[in-house]
Image: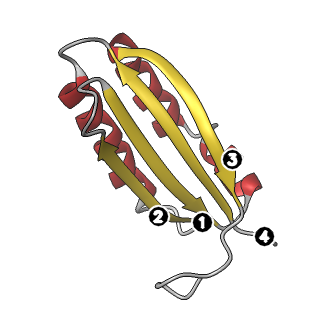
Amino acid sequence: MRRFGLITKFTAFAGRQEYLAEILVNAGGEMEELEECQFYIVNLANERDTDIYVYELWESQEAHQDSLTLNVTQALVQKAKPYINSVERICTLTPVRGKEGI
């Protein structure tokens, strides 16, 4: 099975970047419970005070898709919606190898 990487850009409404980032960080805490999720990193953009980039690394694309159906994920999506202006999938990746030995 091939590992699956994903970079997503969340654009918050003006003045809401930190609120949205906090919700996404909490989502990362929930991902700690899932062994299939190997990385979930929330990044604030330095150039724009509305943008947040999330990098995820999963055992497989199917594991990522399955995570989107979990009740906890759905609850976090509902909580984040009022702060999200837009969501853009920047790219998907096939991780090969890196410092962590993936």
Q: Is residue 13 above or below residue 76?
A: above
> Residue 89: x and y, percent?
60, 34
Residue at the (32%, 16%) spot, across then down: 83
Q: Are marks 4 and 3 in contact (CB under 8 Å)?
A: no
Q: For this view, does 12 lie left or right of residue 46?
A: right
- Gap in angstroms between the C-alphas marked 4 and 3: 16 Å
**Corner quadrant of residue 23:** top left
Looking at the picture, the colour scheme in use is secondary structure
Residue hosting label 3: 66
Q: Secondary structure at mark 2?
A: strand
Q: Is residue 90 left or right of residue 76?
A: right
User: What's the distance in space between the residues labelled 4 and 1, CA to CA?
Assistant: 12 Å
- Which sits earlier in the primary sequence, circle 3 or circle 2? 2
Amino acid identity at mark 2: Phe
Q: Are marks 1 and 3 in contact (CB under 8 Å)?
A: yes
Residue annotated with mark 4: 2
Q: Which mark is drawn over residue 39?
A: 2
Number of labelled discs?
4
Q: Residue at x 21, y 26 (%)?
A: 19
Instruction: Name the residue beneath numbered marker 1.
Output: 36
- Could you tell me the amino acid type at mark 3? Asp
